[in-house]
Image (cartoon, helix red, strand yellow):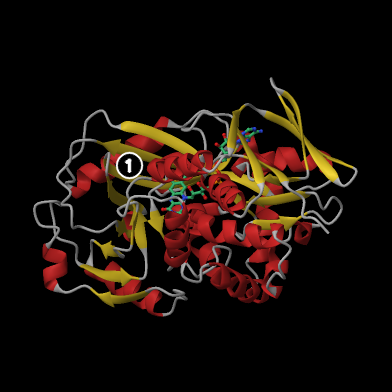
Amino acid sequence: MTRPQHWAVVGGGLVGAAIALRLQAAGFEVVLIDRGDARRGASFGNIGHIAAEQGEPMPSPATLKSALGRLFAFGGPLDFRARDVALWGPWALRFLAASRPAAVARNAETLNRLLDDPLAAWGRLAVLADAPDDLIRPTGHAVVWSAPEAARRGLEAWRGARTGTATFRPMEADDLAAYDGVLAKRPAGGIRFTGTGQVSEPQRVRDALLDAFVRRGGHVVRDDVTAVRPVAEAAEVVLAKEGVIGVDRVVVAAGAWSAGLMAPLGVRVPLIGERGYSVQSAEHAWADDLPLTVFEDRALVVARFSGGLRASSHVEFGDPSARPDPRKWRHIEAQLKALGVAFSDAPDRWCGPRPTLADYLPAVGRLQAHPAIHYAFGHQHLGLTLAAKTAELMEQMALGRPAPGWLDALRIERFR
Ligand SMILES: Cc1cc2nc3c(=O)[nH]c(=O)nc-3n(C[C@H](O)[C@H](O)[C@H](O)COP(=O)(O)OP(=O)(O)OC[C@H]3O[C@@H](n4cnc5c(N)ncnc54)[C@H](O)[C@@H]3O)c2cc1C
């Protein structure tokens, strides 16, 4: 039997771009369709961390216990847009179900399979993209705390956490002294991870994937996809301006907007836009050899990229296309000021939606009811980390190779 040859990938964020490149390199003819507004998706302004250490599922009794104290109303990073309650209300009920201990254990098992050495998967994809050596940097990262008590509690929590293929050690006085001159006050304590990393800049990574895709003969269409529909054994992608594209197979990888494309297919998914906020400054004093740093007691991450210093924070549940809330940028800028981090007074401000399913596992697979339609979305806080691995899984599926049994846990039909 011949393999279906023509594929369309809907969505050119990191996940869609990685899949398109993998499929093209595997010998398929691939068209990638994206609206073409790079700043709109989560892939543009994220903090660039290859977060191999995030082996603890977000829905858990511990998350529920700490949620109240983390609300934006009390100075924390967590917010629920009141007018979008119809979106996050039903989602939150499923989140509660996913926080039960038995579900946490199941989800942790799947998450840790996915998180198995993401740096290696990125290394393989970078070779395929013929990317510059500094694009993916296996530099590890640091987690620091400003007060001794927070450091003690933080270290204890990390010692009890699943960290996958990543390992850590407490930071020594010398490690902490590296922040002298960069922060107003040296952190009280910290841990230094290995087996994790960062990228030179998230948008550079996406550009490298898309450039390689086009060099290999891939075709990019800039348009809005209004529908994806099955037609006999194949599928069609309906575009706002350019008509209809007929293909053998489609992958829906439209990030936080994927639910709207799945609903007409009879698939209702508890997907929410979990928006984060970033600010970036071309001028800064962050040393080249300082790692990406998580200021855990401030829920703030800072990373030096090729284009400047970026800081990000906030978790805001609601409509992925809603107008940003400028208070959140001001909050990040105030945090940077309090830390003493040199930063522009007029930074580049960005906000974008993490695509998050209620159990915080992505959906990767093919529709049972319409097998020509595949999907890869819902990568929450880990879309950069998991994009390369997701693309490898999709390639295996496209080639008709046997899938590992644990992949069943990522089927979209789990939400029936
Ligand atoms: C502040 C912040 C920090 C983060 N930090 C990290 C991190 O350090 N490490 C990490 O691993 N992850 C991080 N993430 C998460 C990560 O950015 C996302 O999980 C990831 O970018 C999702 O990629 P995606 O390709 O699925 O979606 P997106 O990047 O949102 O891409 C979807 C694309 O599809 C397009 N699209 C949508 N609908 C349509 C349509 N109908 N027609 C045509 N095109 C369409 C969109 O325009 C967009 O270009 C962070 C996220 C945020 C917000």
Residue 326 in the image: state x and y as whole percent: 40, 31
The C terminus lies in quadrant:
bottom right
Residue displayed at 38% across by 49% down:
47
Residue 284 in the image: state x and y as whole percent: 17, 41
The answer to whether residue 159 of the structure is visible from this angle is yes
Mark 1 lies on a secondary structure that is helix
Q: Residues within 10 Å of mark 1 (few under 14, many from 20)?
A: many
**Residue 412 left/right relative to 161:** right
Q: Residue furthest left?
A: 181
User: Amino acid under label 1?
Assistant: Ile
Residue 83 in the image: state x and y as whole percent: 62, 33
Q: Which residue is mark 1?
A: 332
Along the line of sight, the residue nearer the viewer: 55 or 19: 19
Question: Is residue 185 shown above or below 6?
Answer: below
Write down the quadrant of residue 321 in the picture: top right
Residue displayed at 30% across by 38% down:
280
